[in-house]
Image (cartoon, rainbow, N blue to C red):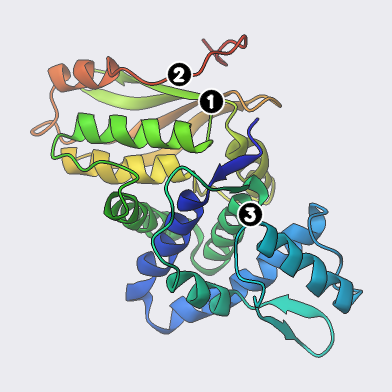
Amino acid sequence: MSRRIDRTAVDALLYGLVKGLDYMGEQKQVIIDRMGGVMLQYLVETGTVASPANPGKSARSLKEFLTTNGYVPSIPLHFKPRAPSFAFPDFVDILSQRVRPSLGSTKVDWILYETILYGMTRVLDDQLGVQAQLILDRIGTSMLDYLIEVGAIERSDDPKVLLQNVIDYFIKAGYAKSFRFELEGAPPDTFVSRYESARYYTTVFRRIQKEGSALLSCPLCLIGHSVWATQGWRFGNILEVRIRSDGNVFSRAKIYPSTERFTEEDARSFSKMKVQRAKSPNNWVGR
C-alpha cells in the first residue's frame, strides 16, 4: 500500500473540516480543540512521535515530523502543565495562510493524512454519535469545492464526468491503487465498492469500528456522496464490508435514490463508467 499521498489531499481535508463545522457555532471550537489531543495520541500509539512522558523529546519529534512533511517548523505546542499537547487550532490557522499548493509535485507521509482522519472521526463520534455522518458529508462537499478551486479536480455539470474526475484524482494522489463500483437493484438500492490497496480501511476504518463507531470518513466516499446527492441520492449504513490486510476492500451500502430523478438507464450508465486502474497481480476482494 502507498505510504505517501498528495499534500493537496491533506489540505483539502483540513479545509473541508473547518468549513464543514462552520454552522455549529461554539461546538466547532470544542471539536477542533479536542482533535489536537486525539491526533497526538494516535501519533504516539503508532510510533510516529515520542511519548509525552518525555516532553522535550515528544515536542522535537512532532515538529520534525511536520517539518519533514513540508510544514513550518514553528508548529505550536501547548504544555498542560508539562506534557505537550498538539495545538491543532493553531495548526489549522497556519495551514489556512498557505499559498496555493503545487499540485502533483509534493507528497507527504500517509500517516499525517491518517491521523487527521482518525482524530476528526473519533471526536465527531464522541460529540455527535451517528448524527456526525451528516457533518462528515458536509466536510466532503467542502473538500470537493477546495479541490476544484485549486485545480486538482476539473469541474463538470455532468455528475458522471465529475465522479470520474474525482476517482482519477484520488488514485493518482495515492489514496488507492484502483477503485470501481457497481449498482444493484432496479431502481438501484445498493452501492457496491471495490478498492485495491486502500489504506484508510486497514487503519482508520478498522480502528473506529473496533471502538464501536459506525461512521464512514473515507474522503473519496464523502466527496462521492456530495456528487450523488445532485441525483437525489442519500447513503445509509454499510451492509457488509470485507477488508484484507493488503488493503483490498469489498463493501455494500444501502442507498435511497429519488426514482423521479434517477432512472434504471442512469443506473446502468453509472455502472459502466470507465475507472482508471493501476496494474496489480492481486484480484479484487469479493470479485
- x, y percent for residue 32: 53, 74
Residue at which label 1 appears: 177
Q: Amino acid at mark 3?
A: Leu
Q: Estimate how packed mark 2 is, as few (under 14), some (14 to 19) or many (20 or more) residues with alpha carbons within 10 Å.
A: some
- x, y percent for residue 35: 60, 69
Q: Is 124 above or below relative to 89?
A: above
Q: Amino acid at mark 1?
A: Lys
Point out the tag, 1 or 2, that comes first from the N-terminus.
Answer: 1
Per the image, label 3 sits on a secondary structure element best described as helix
Q: Estimate how packed mark 1 is, as few (under 14), some (14 to 19) or many (20 or more) residues with alpha carbons within 10 Å.
A: many
Quarter of the image for the N terminus: give it.
top right
Quarter of the image for residue 98 reads bottom left
Q: Is 263 above or below relative to 42?
A: above
Identified at 83% across, 70% down, the residue is 58
Front residue of 65/170: it is 65
Q: Is residue 179 visible?
A: yes
Residues at marks 1 and 3 touching, judged by CB atoms closer than 8 Å: no
Q: Estimate how packed mark 3 is, as few (under 14), some (14 to 19) or many (20 or more) residues with alpha carbons within 10 Å.
A: many
Q: Is residue 31 visible?
A: no
Identified at 42% across, 40% down, the residue is 220
Point out the tag, 1 or 3, that comes first from the N-terminus.
Answer: 3
Per the image, label 2 sits on a secondary structure element best described as loop
Q: Amino acid at mark 2?
A: Arg
Residues at marks 1 and 2 touching, judged by CB atoms closer than 8 Å: yes
Point out the tag, 2 or 3, that comes first from the N-terminus.
Answer: 3
Residue at which label 3 appears: 112
Residue at which label 2 appears: 277
Identified at 74% across, 59% down, the residue is 43
